[in-house]
Image: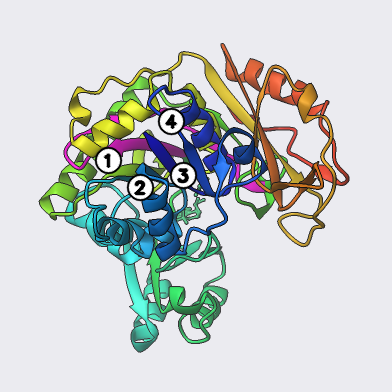
Amino acid sequence: MNVLILGSGGREHAFAYKIKQSSLCKNLYVAPGNSGTGEIASNLEINVNQFEQIVEAIKNLNISLVVVGPEVPLVNGLTDFIKGSSDLKDIIVIGPNKHAAQLEGSKDFAKDFLNRHNIPTASHKTFTNENIKDAFSYIDEMKSPYVLKADGLAAGKGVLIIKDPNEAKKELEEMLINSKFGDASKSVVIEEFLDGIEVSCFVITDGKNYKLLPSAKDYKRIGEGDTGLNTGGMGAVSPPTFLTKEFMEKVENQVIKPTVEGLKKDNINYQGFIFFGLIKVNEEPYVIEYNVRMGDPESEVVLPRIKSDIMEMFFSVGKGTLKDHKIIIDNNKAATVFLVSGGYPEKYEKNKEIFGLDLVQDSMVFHAGAKYEDGKLKTNGGRVVAVTSKANTIEEALEMSYDSIKKISFEKMNYRKDIGFDL
Ligand code: AMP
Ligand code: GLY
């Protein structure tokens, strides 16, 4: 069967790597892909928001399975668009329809869903510019710090955590009145601050049942010791060592099962991954966000730990037989470290030649912001490549990644030397 992956990051390279291992995949295409996916699959010059071109490619290339990497096309209704096209209603799309994707596309929708199904989450209220005065009163009633969230998608930048109430009110005005995040901040969720450790949990669902995938922790800040600006993710480990069996049972019973059941009760048909952004407060899980896709860089540690055939898993999602699918997880632990362009996440230069990837033997290198130009591999983004290793322990896996990194270089290369420091 022919498969199409949509996206261009390390996550999509990790998907391509995993799908290529399956004998069920005949031809693999990635749109638009990157230098890494181009080495193991055929890249198509189509971006993830060109719905017409995507459907044309699906028909011309006889694609039977589409795996959607990022959230934006899902929130914009790509799955509905593909399935609504003539002759494509039976195609398997891993990624939910537009209605279901609101779980990520609207924080207010997600909060309503969480509350309706009694799933633990921070208390909140949602405001628009029409009731901004009520929002100010709400801030006056709350304890610092204040968590302000743009309702819509804002490329990971729409959440502000502010200590001073007056500054919180000023930022709220920026969001609601001066469109700080465009249409995404026409509505703002203000919620209680939760103090705890964050963890990412993942399932795949066919809409009836779900399978638990490995959990992960990502390191979002640019600086060591979790300091400095937020990034797309500087590294990740799987599983996070603080995830005890008892805690995971709570996650399944209090969060995952009520979510899948809640989707059914609400008649929301969902096929794809659900990413639970959780925070652990006094041994209790709270949902801070849903994502309707896999995480990046979490995919670079989660997918390599899936031992069973990922294509069989996708088939069973398509057929609605996920209940009978047996997913096998590697006992090995995994760690990934992102090499980034100097200056990222602020201004940085591109087009630096990358050396030494061919010397890496004990790690997998997933490309993100990299491209081939005149036969040379060059940097093409902030996050350049993710170096993943697997071993008996997270410590060993990290040591292997850091050893591999010694062989890789490009001008102004930067990375965090302390991934996993807190475990
Ligand atoms: P989100 O986009 O909802 O995942 O929020 C981005 C980041 O803000 C999260 O990864 C958390 O670090 C932080 N955050 C979001 N909501 C809360 C909250 N209620 N309490 C504390 N931190 C939060
Ligand atoms: N690593 C967080 C995300 O993919 O949104």
Q: Is residue 328 shown above or below 97?
A: above
According to the picture, the residue beneath numbered tag 4 turns out to be 26
* Residue projecting furthest to the front: 60
Q: On the rendered structure, is 321 left or right of 285? A: left
Q: Do tag 2 and tag 1 residues touch (Cβ < 8 Å)?
A: yes
Magenta residues, as a range? 199-221
Q: Amino acid at mark 2?
A: Val
Q: Secondary structure at mark 4?
A: loop
Display colour scheme: rainbow
Rendered residue at 35%/77% (across/down): 127
Give me the disc on residue 255.
1
In the rendered image, which quarter contains the N terminus? top left
Q: On the rendered structure, is 399 left or right of 109? A: right
Tell me: is circle 4 under 8 Å from ligand 2: no
Q: Residue 101 location in percent, x, y? A: 32, 57
Q: Residue 318 location in percent, x, y? A: 24, 38
Q: On the rendered structure, is 217 left or right of 94? A: right
Local packing at callout 3 (Cα closer than 10 Å; few below 14, some 14-19, many 20+) is many
